[in-house]
Image: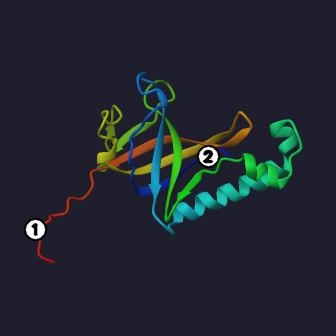
């Protein structure tokens, strides 16, 4: 399941690339993207979550070292898609530098040598390529790891508040 695929185009994030401990400059960070309602990205991720529940239930003894019922898998599984009200998001991990770092591109197809500066991640819309390389487990919970492989940064279109409509 580690193949690379496009998560979406024009995706936004609210919080930038962050880590649990804000006082440490970590290489690996969380990067959450807001998902457009009823879009193809949301449908694809919900289908991946449904597949994961089936697969983990069928193979729980091998994957989690004990046979679990569907209800137990549903209780322990952390879905890719997080729903809150009418909004949804997906949590990804990104390596911002180092040998496994994501690559960064501008909307003209030119590679950018570094990730966006701190405090500017929210200024862009993104086309995102991701991979799902593994199942993670921690303290009785588990889920699929979604890792950013490449980002195309797009400056959001400016809206003239004085334009006549």
Tell me which residue sits at (40%, 49%) in the image.
Answer: 13
Taking the image as shown, residue 89 lies to the left or right of residue 156, namely right
Residue highlighted by disc 2? 3
Q: Name the residue under label 1.
A: 162
Q: Which residue is drawn at 32% across and 37% down?
A: 116
**Is 155 on the left-hand or right-hand side of 102?**
left
Is residue 13 placed above or below 24 in the rendered structure?
below
Q: In which quarter of the image is residue 162?
A: bottom left
Secondary structure of the residue carrying numbered label 1: loop
Q: Do the residues labelled 1 and 2 touch (CB within 8 Å)?
A: no
Label 2 Cα neighbours within 10 Å, binned few <14 / some 14-19 / many ≥20:
few
Q: Where is residue 165 in the image (x, y as percent from the top left)?
A: 16, 78
Residue 77 is situated, as x and y percent measured from the top left of the image, at: 71, 47
First in sequence: mark 1 or mark 2? 2
Q: In which quarter of the image is residue 138?
A: top right
**Residue at the image position 45 percent from the left and 63 percent from the top:** 36
């Amino acid at each position: 399941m580690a193949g690379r695929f496009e998560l979406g185009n024009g995706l936004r994030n609210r919080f930038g690339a962050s880590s649990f401990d804000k006082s440490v400059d970590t290489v690996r960070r969380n990067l959450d993207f807001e998902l457009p309602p009823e879009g193809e990205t949301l449908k694809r991720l919900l289908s991946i979550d449904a597949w994961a529940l089936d697969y983990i239930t069928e193979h729980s003894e091998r994957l989690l070292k004990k046979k679990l019922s569907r209800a137990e898998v549903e209780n322990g599984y952390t879905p890719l898609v997080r729903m809150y009200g009418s909004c949804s998001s997906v949590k990804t991990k990104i390596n911002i530098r180092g040998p496994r770092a994501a690559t960064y591109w501008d909307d003209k197809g030119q590679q950018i040598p570094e990730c966006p500066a701190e405090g500017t991640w929210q200024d862009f819309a993104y086309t995102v390529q991701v991979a799902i390389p593994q199942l993670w487990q921690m303290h009785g919970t588990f889920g699929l790891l979604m890792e950013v492989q490449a980002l195309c940064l797009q400056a959001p279109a400016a809206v003239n508040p004085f334009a006549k409509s």
